[in-house]
Amino acid sequence: MKKIWISIGLFFACLQFVKAQESNLPDSSQVVNLVYNGSFEEYRYCPKRVDAVGILTLVEGWYQPTRGSADYFNVCGSRECGVPNNKLGQQMPHDGDGYCGIYCSKNDYREYLQTRLRRKLHKGDSIRLTYWVSLSEESTGAVATLGGLFTQESISDTVRSLFLAKEREYITEDIFQTISHTYNPQVVNPIDSTIMDTRNWHRITGTFVAQGGEQYITIGNFHLAERSGYVDYDSLTRLLPGAYYYIDDVTVECLNCPPPIADDLNVDSTYLTEEQPAFTVGCTFVLKEIFFEFDKSTLLQQSYFELKSLISLLDTYPQMRIEIGGHTDSKGSDSYNLRLSENRAKAVYDYLILKGISEKRLQYKGYGKNKPIDTNDTEEGRANNRRVEFQILSM
């Protein structure tokens, strides 16, 4: 059987090279956008409404890191979420058919967007972030300090307010206090340049030198209200008590990197190990980065890169048939765990069909807590047992 190593997040079919526009770049170089779906063109379903308490689950590869409810707009959307007209105003996309929206109140409420880069940044990489914003007509004011924060790990919080970095400071081994401080985005719009245009798109851009290992970008306003350059406008006494911005066309480029090849954009981890060098019938692989809403079967967009890799595998082996299995830890009743595990397996099954994989190649099953791969006596063990995996049925 042909041996193949499939990296999670293998995007050999998705490379999009952008011609360098800056004269200081080598003539022969090409830079690749390290952000997948930067124009928000790929989505699961057309948006139907602006949800004040919802979770962004429509845009492929993008998600909200806090409970602040980011929104999605597209030409195929409903009256609330359409393009160019929608509940928050009127704007054509800067690129393509869709864009996202985030809200920055004049007090503490914030919304953010987050995604994982195609690859980790290397120490010394000269990185340029560019994205475009436009103020909604339904705002009552505008801010200046929208920016982009690059981090090594995905950051998140359960709040709907200003996104703060929280660190534990230990007084003794058992006593600690939580210290909160504002994040410092590497790229930020100047505080004296309030973004107030409701007709046109405003470019936010900047460069920085990577420390190494950064793989996530979060977009939004990381500054306190009094340090955000907030301005009230009497002419914009509309729906929202603050500033709402449409976001589009996000690019992250390495300016001093050699022209990339497909392998440069692979994520490090793989399905396979040295002990299991090839895909064979009966082999089972854990989908390590599949995420759901807590206690639900709603797939979160953080799962996108893992799902993309699985689709690549199925495209590579067009005769492969698989079973998607859902598993839980030991907490909860047998019947509840069985139902939850089956619903989660079906969510992955439905996603693959949505993306064009024939249902004849797929089946799903929930196993509940009956097939643990680790102890249920520790949180780490229970986390390992809460999983989705696939088994090869035929090749």
Image (cartoon, rainbow, N blue to C red):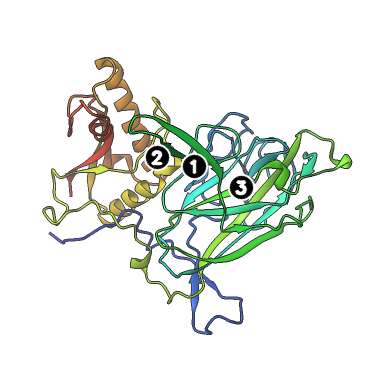
Q: Residue at x 33, y 54 (%)?
A: 312
Q: Nearer the viewer, mark 1 or mark 3?
A: 3
- Among the two numbered marks 2 and 3 on one chain, the one whose residue lies closer to the N terminus: 3
Residue nearest the viewer, comparing 360 with 201: 201
Which corner quadrant of the image does residue 39 belong to? bottom right
Which element is circle 3 on?
A: strand
State the image coordinates of residue 182 (x, y, percent, origin top left).
57, 45
Which residue appears farthest toward the right when viewing the image?
Answer: 235
Which corner quadrant of the image does residue 193 belong to? bottom right
Note whether 47 is above or below 40 in the view shown.
Answer: above
Task: Report if the CB atoms under discs 1 and 2 are less than 8 Å apart.
Answer: yes
Please tell me how crowded label 1 is: few (under 14), some (14-19), or many (20+) other residues with Cα within 10 Å. few
Residue kind at label 1, given as amino acid type? Arg
Q: Is residue 92 visible?
A: no
Q: Which mark is residue 293?
A: none
Note whether 371 is above or below 156 in the view shown.
Answer: above
Residue that carries the numbered disc 1 in the rendered image: 44
Residue nearest the viewer, comparing 214 with 322: 214
State the image coordinates of residue 92 (x, y, percent, origin top left).
71, 52
Residue that carries the numbered disc 2 in the rendered image: 351
Lateral position of residue 52 relative to residue 267, left or right:
right
Q: Residue at x 53, y 85 (%)?
A: 27
State the image coordinates of residue 351 (x, y, percent, origin top left).
39, 40
Residue that carries the numbered disc 3 in the rendered image: 220
State the image coordinates of residue 98 (x, y, percent, origin top left).
62, 49
